[in-house]
Image (cartoon, rainbow, N blue to C red):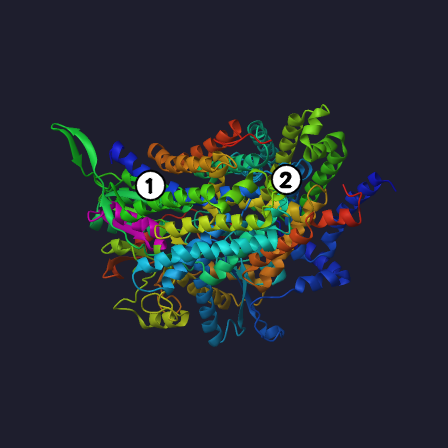
Amino acid sequence: MDFGPHLMLASLEGAVISAILVLTAMGLSIVFGVMRVVNVAHGEFYMLGAVLTWFITSIVGGHPAIGFVAAIVVAPLLVGCLAAGADRLILKRVNYDPDRTIVATIGMLYIIQQTTLMSLGPDARPVEAPFNTRLSLPWFEWGENGFAMIWPWGLSTTSYKLFVIAAAAMVLVALWLVLTRTKVGLLMRATQQDSETAQAFGVPVGKVYSWVFGLGAGLAALGAVLVVPIQQAHYLMGHDPLLLAFIVVIIGGLGSLPGTVIAAILIGMSDGIISVFFSPTLAKIIATFLVAMVLVFRPQGLLGKIAR
Amino acid sequence: MSNGTSKTSKISRRSALLGMGAGAGALAAAGVLPGTMGFAQAQSSAPIKIGFQKHATGIGAAYGRWYGATTDAAVKRINDAGGINGRPVEVVVEDDGTDPGRGAEVLEKFANQHNCDVAFGTLFSHVVIGSAPRAGELKLPYFVVSEGHHVASGMLNRYTLQPGITDVKSQVISMAPFVANNLGKKVTMIYPDFAFGHDHRDFFSEAIAAQGGEVVAKIAIPPTETSFTRYFPSIPRETEVIYHVMVGPAVLTFVKELGEFFGPNRPELFGFIDSLEAVDIKSSGLEFLEGTYFWEGMPRYAQADQADYEKDYRAAVGVDENGASIADSKDVATYAHMFGCWETLNIIKAGMESADYQGPQDRAKLIEAVEAMTDMPAGADHPQGAKRFNGKTHQTFGSQYISKVTDGKLVVEHTASIEDGLYEDEVDYTAQSF
Amino acid sequence: MTDNSKSNLMHIGVLVVLFALFFILPVYHAGNMSRIMVLAVYAMGFNLLFGYTGLLSLGHAMFFAAGMYGFGLTTNLGGLPVPLAFGFGVICAGVLALVVGFLALRTIGVAFMIVTLMFAQTAYLVVLYFGTYTRGDEGFVIQQAQRSIAGIDLTSETGRYFTALLIFGICFLLIARLVQTPFGKTLVAIRENEERTRMLGYDSHRHKLKILVISGLFSGVAGATYALLFGYVGATFATVQYSIFPLVWVLLGGAGTTIGPLIGVFFMFYLINISSGFTDAYMLVVGVVLVLLTLFAPHGLAGLLRKKVLTWLP
């Protein structure tokens, strides 16, 4: 394929990756930002979202769209509640001490993974997309008669993928509205800025933490619900999204939600585009190394504030 | 080369010390043995213990399940027919987590704690390679069911054998003639960028060149990749055949996206059923595979000319004529690999009977007996097909099947013979000492 | 008895017990102990950086792998005898730690975690990229014949156990000595409050770089020993989970104690071993135990000992 269309295709694919990544990373960013804890089990909440989607769509028969709508509502809610419960039961008791939280969430990771293995089994389960038509995309070429539209071989996307991009954007907007325009959002932002002062002002910090933890997990699950018709549900699928989400959050800057969004877009897009120029494994090596170097020379990330 | 003497003298001294004061340690060592059946412990009917290194968790878990089911069925059949040398067979199962470090630990458990006679059953190459050194040191016969070329490549040791399943080099080179003569001579290869994929890339490039074809592009996909569309633009326009061997949970995505990329105009496709083991070919998004070809280790769908012994085999392992579980038709088996467990266990039996195996002291004799085996006819013991075992390289050769997806089922179109897959010996394990 | 002599006695005592265990334990458990001792060296290396200095690295697998591959490749491809190849492996790990240190120590806290994680991921991908030599994820074998020194076969049960014990013992005593020195105490001061330590005139960055290299060296020793004694080198050991293991071992055993890492490795090893005997879902058991331990014994087992009983534990 020629360079132009290839780049366009890579960009579209990158956009889909960014869309899912932004949701997953947002979840982590909010948890990180407000509670200052490293949640190693975040990827498992993502995986649970995908697995629950498969479960719900297999129970709800009929047109795949019905099951999908049910899943997109129920799965994030269930996962969020589970996470909030884990917070009250475990994380609160360890006082959100950084080391203890890491160990506790590693423990949660194993528990969730193994329970899924025991119930779902080891196979990858596909989920049918609610709608999925192949869309050939045009490209422009400077021909003899000026600009002409051509349809390069292989340049295409699917309606579902475009939907994912749109859906992620909508969720982000909704999230932004909640955080900036509602009382709940205000409480969260207050707790993030200074939890002690917030507590002094009567903000129920403990409850806010549970809410935030649940919201973070729910966002990850939502990302997984959107992605599972493109990929499959598998009990080990949480590993890579966890790594990527962490990178995005740190690069974007701790405590900066806009930073997370920008970093997610950058990393998601570059993942696709770099592979246009380099062999895939080499591309991954370069990308990983670049991420490290960004942090080395700018530890606070793109939009973060320097740690006090 | 080896150090037999120091070992035997150490064992006798150690067992003396053990007798003196090992009370607590011995009690701790007894532990709980999984899979223990209630056979009498009298010397003459003491069970033959086979340690089954199972991928019960980790990335290989989907295969581990079916390997377990096949092993149970094969052992039941052997025991119903009187066991081995009149002794019942007991399978001791340990999970290796599809991890090479853990695999080695499990072999130690088999040899030193469970006192197994042999170990068997590993699929994933890195676990085999990680465990084989320990098998050699522990002098534990290790029968792997792995498809990897590592046994025949000479990397391992005389205690590791693969008599029940063919290896990837043999599979790949026997595919080349069919691909070149029926599908096309310009091939684009898409494979995972690790050892398994590299083996395909290297073996097939050589083999197709020998048939007058050429590989016009080699697309290596990084491990754990989950979206593939951006790799497809690298497929050259003149490609006649795409040869794909993607494995792992993301395979369905791969096939779906391949279909979405090409739309109605696609080149010929030749894949390995490894991509779709335990996956229903009727899954949504896989309609694209209609009319494409697959290598099958053993035909998943019961063919029109299925032999009676294969019917019995399917019934025994719990698989219906569509290659899915009899209990749940959505639960597709890893049919192209699991037969290896069945056949390997039968070979262990044949070897033990031929060597008049009495106990661990006869392990070397057992290996020599297996090394002496050559042709094994198709039948109840070898339902996948006839085998020819090469005692020097410890690797077996067999038929390979090429199927076409027709009306949502896999129909065998061509069977490559044992001769099609033969290659020069790369090692002679029989020249090595025990 | 002074704290110092109590501590010396304990360290020697541990080694004596380990020595004696070889003769008491059945073959199977003695074999396990060999493995545990080697992994404990890895854990101790990690503990120096994390437990004593307070730097959480999520990339230590790269140092373990550097030692492992440095040893394995020079033995197989270069044909070097064991001691030289071993030394080369350790040096590789040390050099890698130096390079990583120069870059990564510009960051602290969570950024440091991610940077080390990223470097480790890069190392893993590089191992895969040079698959022609490293055989990538499949790995390669070091034949039994090559794993001997001066005619002593290191792959026999005796050879393996005592090599592991020797290497563990040396590392154990070196580290015990290190943490008692002023350098070691400064590390603890950096962990407790880096600003104050700098204010008192200590060059905290130099200290951190030094301990990162030392930590990398010990991890490399563990990696090279593992390849030597168990005959396998593979990319699995460079994956993220092998960076998480030492963290779990150290936290369970007791971070910031010399005996903690050994206890942690021992505990986790037998926890997995015993629970896999009665259920396939042994990782579930491990997960539950981790959660319970962090809820009720946050300083790890040795840390608990130190708090309640043996306050002099180094």
**Vertical relation: C176 (above or below) A101:** above
Residue under label 2, please give it: C46
How far apart marks 2 and 1 lie (CA) works out to 39 Å
Badges 2 and 1: C-beta atoms under 8 Å apart?
Answer: no
What range is drawn magenta here? B252-275
Q: Are marks 2 and 1 on the same chain?
A: no
- Number of marks in picture: 2
Q: Identity of the amino acid at label 2? A: Phe
User: Which of the 4 quarters of the picture holds residue C282?
Assistant: bottom right
Q: Identity of the amino acid at label 1? A: Glu
Residue under label 1, please give it: A13
Give the letter of the chain under mark 1.
Answer: A
B254 magenta-colored: yes
Res. B203 in view:
no
- Residue C71 position, x and y percent, is 57, 37
Q: Residue at x 11, y 28 (%)?
A: A145
Give the letter of the chain under mark 2.
Answer: C
User: Which of the 4 quarters of the picture holds residue C28?
Assistant: bottom right
Q: Local crowd at mark 1 within 10 Å, few (<14), some, or many (≥20)?
A: many
